[in-house]
Image (cartoon, grey):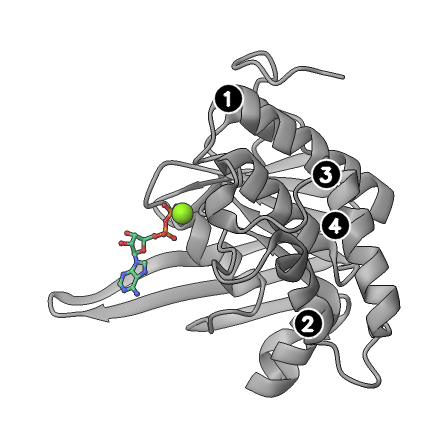
Amino acid sequence: MIVVRNLEKRYPTPQGEITVLHSISFTVEPEASVAIVGPSGSGKTTLLGLMAGLDLPSAGEVRLLDEDIFSLTEEERARFRANHIGFVFQTFHLLSSLTALENVQVPLELAEPGDTNLLSRKEGDEWARELLERVGLGNRMKHYPSQLSGGEQQRVALARAFANRPRILFADEPTGNLDRETGNQVVALLEELNRAAETTLVLVTHDLALAGRADSRIHLDGGRVQSDGEGVRRDRGGVPTR
Ligand code: ADP
Ligand code: MG
């Protein structure tokens, strides 16, 4: 369960303070998926960063799994993310000096004694390999990011995002740098992994067809929620139903 309450973000600028998010409130049920849609500059990435506890709000509250994340210290928040949260970014964010397999293992190596996702080296190695198999990259484990296509890099990033068995997955335009067909493959995998892992999914997307596949939609414009987004049409674009 995710609760966002009266969330605000303001930035000081030389021209004066600007408000990027105006008192945003909504909830997301456990294991549900929500798409955040809206024009460029409407505050989607800012909202996602706050919801994931990567950034601090000017006002308001975010509760993830019953935890008030802004009442935690920076270090506690980092532990919380390492234990419960996965991310997928538009630009993949793989570490170029690590192989596909090593990239997927990074979140596992960040686990500390007492963490829910702590695995032995052997278990972690097997789990990372299994995830890469599941995204169809069993034959690319030793490749470096520069030796992979964009779609393959994003599939590695998906495998990495699920490595710590997150309860909540945040994805910011995960298909934004991919052609439509490759994007559709990545989305199909994202949905499959999400279903199998019973993860709550928060997805930022420009793609209305993709947004239409989520359980609900938040429509942002100028940093305000326009509606709960019902009525986003499913029949534009071309994400295939499997
Ligand atoms: P979106 O992801 O919907 O394209 P963003 O959340 O990235 O939008 O940005 C929303 C608005 O906030 C934009 O107008 C952007 O210029 C502004 N903004 C983002 N980060 C900063 C910052 N660090 N300082 C000032 N303004 C910012
Ligand atoms: Mg953005």
Closer to the N terminus: mark 1 or mark 3? Answer: 3
Question: Residue 75 appears in which quarter of the rendering?
Answer: bottom right
Contact flag, marks 4 and 1 (Cβ < 8 Å)? no
Choose mark 4 or mark 1, whichever is in front: 1
Check whether the beta carbons of the residues at disc 4 and disc 2 lie within 8 A of each other.
no
Q: How far is disc 1 from disc 3 in space, using C-alphas? A: 18 Å
**Which three-letter amino acid code belongs to the residue tagged 2?**
Ala
Cα separation, mark 4 vs mark 3, equals 19 Å
Q: Of the residues tagged 1 and 3, which is closer to the observer?
A: 3
Q: Mark 4 or mark 3: which comes first in sequence? A: 3
Spatial separation of the CA atoms under disc 3 and disc 2? 22 Å
Kind of residue indicated by mark 4 = Thr
12 lies above or below 113 = above
At a point 65% along the width and 84% down the height, the residue shown is 76
Point out the tag, 4 or 1, that comes first from the N-terminus.
1
The residue pinned by badge 3 equals 135
Q: Specify the label residue 200 is tagged with.
A: 4
10 Å crowding of disc 4: few (<14), some (14-19), many (20+): many
Query: Could you classify mark 3 by the number of other residues whose Cα lies within 10 Å: few (under 14), some (14-19), or many (20 or more)?
Result: many
**Image coordinates for residue 146, horizontal then vertical, percent:** 46, 47
Q: Residue at x 73, y 69 (%)?
A: 108
Q: Can residue 44 be seen at all in this image of the molecule?
A: yes
What is the tally of numbered marks visible in this picture? 4
Residue type at numbered disc 3? Val
Question: Which labelled disc corresponds to residue 82?
Answer: 2
* Crowd class of label 2 (few under 14; some 14 to 19; many from 20; radius 10 Å): many
Task: Looking at the image, tell me whether mark 3 or mark 2 is earlier in sequence order.
Answer: 2
Using the numbered discs, state the Cα–Cα distance from disc 1 to disc 2 in whole angstroms: 31 Å
Give the residue at mark 1. Answer: 180
100 or 4: nearer the viewer:
100
